[in-house]
């Protein structure tokens, strides 16, 4: 598996499970059609149709691409962490029962963990 080179800031979040400051990420207010892929390995994670505005300061999705994201208990003992199923990159956290959408699920994802591929370009055309 080929992994992309990360900046110090990207490594802090993706490898060391940090969190970017709210309302600072490049994808918080992006609502174009396309696919969000893992910044570390390029695996497709989320389609734009599953993105919604939770007004929490981070991109929010109510559904991942099937099999693309896995969850595990967060070291804080309270939250559930989510990561790329392909390379293990830390994405953020998943919250259930908030009633934002019909799925009752919110993947709260660090923009820095993602890369956006506009519809019809790159890996987006192959994402399912």
Image (cartoon, rainbow, N blue to C red):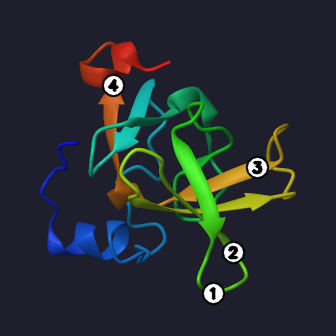
Query: First in sequence: mark 4 or mark 2?
Result: 2
Q: Is residue 115 visible?
A: yes
Query: First in sequence: mark 2 or mark 3?
Result: 2
**Helix, strand or loop status at disc 4:** strand
Q: Quadrant of residue 97?
A: bottom right
Say which residue label 1 marks: 76
* Alpha carbon distance from label 1 to label 3: 20 Å
Mark 1 Cα shell of 10 Å, populated few (<14), some (14-19), many (≥20):
few
Depth-wise, is mark 1 or mark 4 nearer the camera? Answer: 1
Does 92 appear above or below 29? below
Say which residue label 4 marks: 118
Circles 2 and 1: CB distance less than 8 Å?
Answer: yes
Closer-to-camera residue (95/87): 87
**Helix, strand or loop status at disc 2:** loop
* Alpha carbon distance from label 4 to label 2: 31 Å
Task: Please name the residue shown 32% across and 70% down the image.
Answer: 15
Depth-wise, is mark 4 or mark 3 nearer the camera? Answer: 3
On the image, the x and y values in percent for residue 64 come to 59, 38
State the mark number for residue 79. 2
Circles 1 and 3: CB distance less than 8 Å?
Answer: no
């Amino acid at each position: 598996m080929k992994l992309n080179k990360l900046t110090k800031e990207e490594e802090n979040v993706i490898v060391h499970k940090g969190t970017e400051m709210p309302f600072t990420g490049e994808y918080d207010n992006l609502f174009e059609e396309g696919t969000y892929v893992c910044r570390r390995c390029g695996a497709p994670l989320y389609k734009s149709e599953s993105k919604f505005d939770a007004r929490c300061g981070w991109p929010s999705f109510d559904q991942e691409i099937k099999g693309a994201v896995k969850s595990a208990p967060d070291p804080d003992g309270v939250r559930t962490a989510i990561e790329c199923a392909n390379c293990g990159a830390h994405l953020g956290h998943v919250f259930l029962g908030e009633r934002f959408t019909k799925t009752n699920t919110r993947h709260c994802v660090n923009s820095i963990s993602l890369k956006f591929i506009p519809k019809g370009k790159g890996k987006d055309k192959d994402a399912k």
